[in-house]
Amino acid sequence: MDPQSHNTGSDEARLDALFQAYRAACPDPEPSANFMPLLWQGIEARQNVSIVFSRLARNLMTAALALSILLGLVVSFSGSRVGQLPSESYVEVLADEHYSQTLDYDDPVHISPAVEQR
């Protein structure tokens, strides 16, 4: 007898024993009149969790949109009561401030034209 065929027969016997142990541990459910209603109850219970999260997400999105609109209206109405804005930009104001602060420390520089040599 071939050693490989002997090993294969042993593997098949072990596999059959494994399947029998599995069948004993997990028996087939007996069909009953309540099988489908119980199945649908399980499905609907899982769907209820996702429905709760989707409703919560929609409510939070609606609240965020309402808050954004409210804040936009507050900013637009409060901005109309502000006085005249300066014509200079922020960068120009900073540059002028820097120039006025450093003016005290600078000495005037005189540049004389270069003499051309031939």
Image (cartoon, helix red, strand yellow):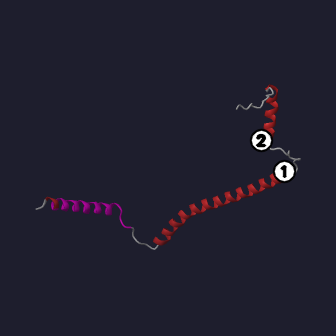
**Magenta region:** 5-28
Residue 50 shown left or right of residue 80 in the figure: left
Instruction: Give percent across and percent down for residue 10.
Output: 19, 59
Residue found farthest to the front: 118
Picture residue at 84% right of the left edge, 53% below the top? 77
Locate residue 13: give its quadrant. Answer: bottom left
Q: Nearer the viewer, residue 40 or 88?
A: 88
Locate residue 96: give its quadrant. Answer: top right
Picture residue at 82% right of the left edge, 54% below the top? 76
Q: Nearer the viewer, residue 70 or 115?
A: 115
Q: Which residue is mark 1?
A: 79
Q: Specify the quadrant that holds the N terminus.
A: bottom left
Say which element carries label 2. helix
- Report crowding for label 1: few under 14, some 14 to 19, many 20 or more residues within 10 A (C-alpha): few
Instruction: Give percent across and percent down for residue 103.
Output: 81, 29
Prevailing secondary structure class for the magenta stretch in the rendered image: helix
Q: Does label 1 or label 2 sit earlier along the sequence?
A: 1
Q: Which residue is mark 2?
A: 91
Locate residue 6: give its quadrant. Answer: bottom left
